[in-house]
Image (cartoon, coloured by chain):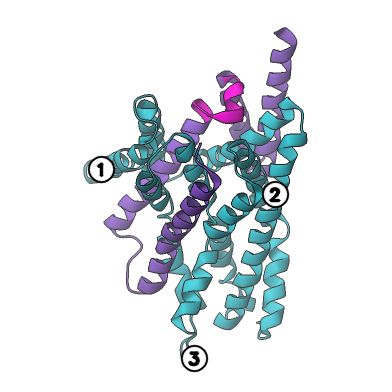
Chain colours: A purple, B cyan
Amino acid sequence: MPGTAEIGVAILACGFVTWLWRGLGVLLSGRLDPKSAMFEWVSCVAYALVAGLIARIIVAPSGLLAQTALADRLLACLVALLAYHLARRNMFAGMVCGIAVFVGAGYVRGLIA
Amino acid sequence: MIADPRRALVLGAREALGVPAAVLGAGFLGYGSLAADAGYPVYLTLLATFAIWALPGQLVLMEMQAAGAALAATLLAVWLSAARFFPMTLTLMPLLRRGGRARSWWRFLLVAQLVSMTTWAVAIRRFEDSDLQDPGSRWQYFIGFSAVCIGSAAVCAVIGQLLIGALPPLAKYGLALLTPLYFFVTLVGEARSKSAIAALICGAAVALALHEAAPGWSLLGAGLIGGSAAFLLQRSHARHG
């Protein structure tokens, strides 16, 4: 685990590189077409990266979540997605149902073990 | 039509209080708990929230540092994960620009830092309404709206960070799953275009395939390999079908 000074420097550097996209958008606004192939590729890369991040946290987490069961995490995802759609794209319903099932499954596991 | 700038500022702030602040707050509540778990003191959690202001990027940073990735690889991955801000800012800024009397460019560069998925989506939709046609009012509205979003995110992150120590284990796990679950539902639930679905599947597959062999590189690989594969799939599909 890196020290806090090291994390702090990394945070500021990450803040800067994140802002670069926002700044670039200001400088080029009105001069670039947001529907070009280049844009499409960049958004595919960003999307795939975030999908990879979430897949990794759910399937192979580190820290606290590593102490929970993979089946419970996957079940929570499935239930949250179902509840979200059943409640007409209501994020709150999805979250509440997913977390409730996750905690409930963990509780039952604790009883059996 | 609102001409008084202060009223537009208050209107933006008021409209952020409610669903936008609550949904963001839930995501950052989980972020705070994950940050505490990763060994961040409260001030670093706040620094990350204000300086990066992009939850996926903040999570990428945390994950990659935990996996022992090199700083350059981490920066590259965070940078790539933030690419969505480019088209967002590109489309938002012309709506804030007054025809004749222009604001100085550095103010636009500063206000661009406020652009996030939530603030952009609401602003783009609201700026079509008749009460927000004046670029000056839009500017104020956007600042008011964003300030409340960032403020509630920061407050919730601190609460999440402090809560994690006080909760029983099961509740702790629930809190830690909040943010990944939120992104899972957002990504899978909102993916409608073919290229988005392809990018989701390719990115997840590459990240998991690389995870064992090269944990420090799996997210970059997911983005570059998975994203490019999704892009090419979508292109060839569009050409043939």
The N terminus of chain B lies in quadrant: bottom right
Instruction: Tell me the SS state at disc 3.
Output: loop
Label total for image? 3
Say which amino acid is labelled 3. Arg
Chain where mark 2 sits = B
Looking at the image, residue B22 sits to the left or right of residue B109; the answer is right
The C terminus of chain B lies in quadrant: top left
Q: Which residues are magenta?
A: A58-69
Q: Residue under circle 3? A: B101
Res. A90 visible in picture: no
Disc on the earlier residue, 2 or 1: 2
Q: Are marks 2 and 3 in contact (CB under 8 Å)?
A: no
Give the residue displayed 49% in from the left and 91% down from the top: B101
Residue B193 placed where, x, y %?
41, 46
Q: Residue under circle 1? A: B232
Say which amino acid is labelled 2. Val
Q: Residue under circle 2? A: B158
Chain where mark 1 sits = B
Residue B164 placed where, x, y %?
71, 37
| Same chain, labels 2 and 3 | yes
Answer whether residue A65 is magenta in the image: yes
